[in-house]
Amino acid sequence: MEQIRNKMEKLRQEAEAAQEEAETSKKRVAALEQELTEKEHTLKSLTHQNSILEKQVEQLETNLKDAKGEAEKGSSALTTTDELQRKLDVLQEEAEKSDRQLRETIEKLRQTDVKAGHYERKVQALEQSTTAWETKHEEMSKKYQETKEELDRFAAEIGSI
């Protein structure tokens, strides 16, 4: 009789531990999903920034072509040429800066994609773990119920004796 009680208590403790583990896993999955959502938002933001930078690069290239054209037309006036040369230098620096930013943005996007894949795999693993714990919990609950019914029958038999 004492062994049955001990066994029931052990099963109850295991079921509670499994339930706590399942809840912890669910919380972890939710946190990872939130983090994935944030990473996706960052990815979208960086993609948008990338498209803006590409448009700026195109505009700067157009401005650069315009400035070169103006420089050729205004070669007779030294001051105009100097101003255009400074403008050209500024535009080239901006183009280089935009190009660097574009490369950095692309690298960040790549890293974000890698991290997103990593977190997706983690989420899948946690979901599988959670499913396994839930299955184990259901089995333990069933065993507990069977043991309880067996104990009740045993108590009824003892009571009838």
Image (tube, helix red, strand yellow):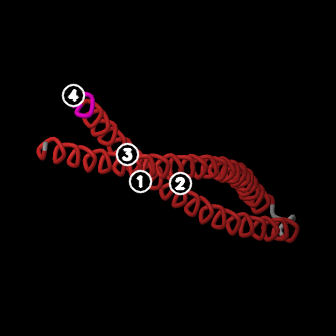
- The rendered magenta stretch, by its main secondary structure, is classed as helix
The residue beneath circle 2 is 39
Which residue is drawn at the image coordinates 44% and 55% (left, top)?
A: 34
Where is residue 157? Give x, y as percent. Answer: 19, 45
Which dot, 2 or 4, sits closer to the camera? Answer: 4
* First of labels 3, 2 by sequence position: 2
Residue kind at label 2, given as amino acid type: Lys
Residue kind at label 4, given as amino acid type: Glu
Q: Which mark is residue 2?
A: 4
The residue beneath circle 3 is 140
Looking at the rendering, which quadrant does residue 10 occupy?
top left
Q: Which mark is residue 128?
A: none
Which dot, 4 or 1, sits closer to the camera? Answer: 4
CB atoms at circles 2 and 4 under 8 Å apart?
Answer: no
Q: Dot 3, crowdedness within 10 Å: few (<14), some or many (≥20)?
A: some
Residue kind at label 3, given as amino acid type: Met
The magenta stretch spans which residues?
Answer: 1-5
Which element is circle 3 on? helix
Which dot, 3 or 4, sits closer to the camera? Answer: 4
Where is residue 123? Give x, y as percent. Answer: 53, 50
Looking at the rendering, which quadrant does residue 43 occupy?
bottom right
Gap between marks 1 and 2 measured at Cα: 14 Å
The foreground one among 82 and 50 is 50
* First of labels 2, 4 by sequence position: 4
Where is residue 152? Give x, y as percent. Answer: 20, 48
The residue beneath circle 1 is 30
The foreground one among 102 and 64 is 102
Which element is circle 2 on? helix
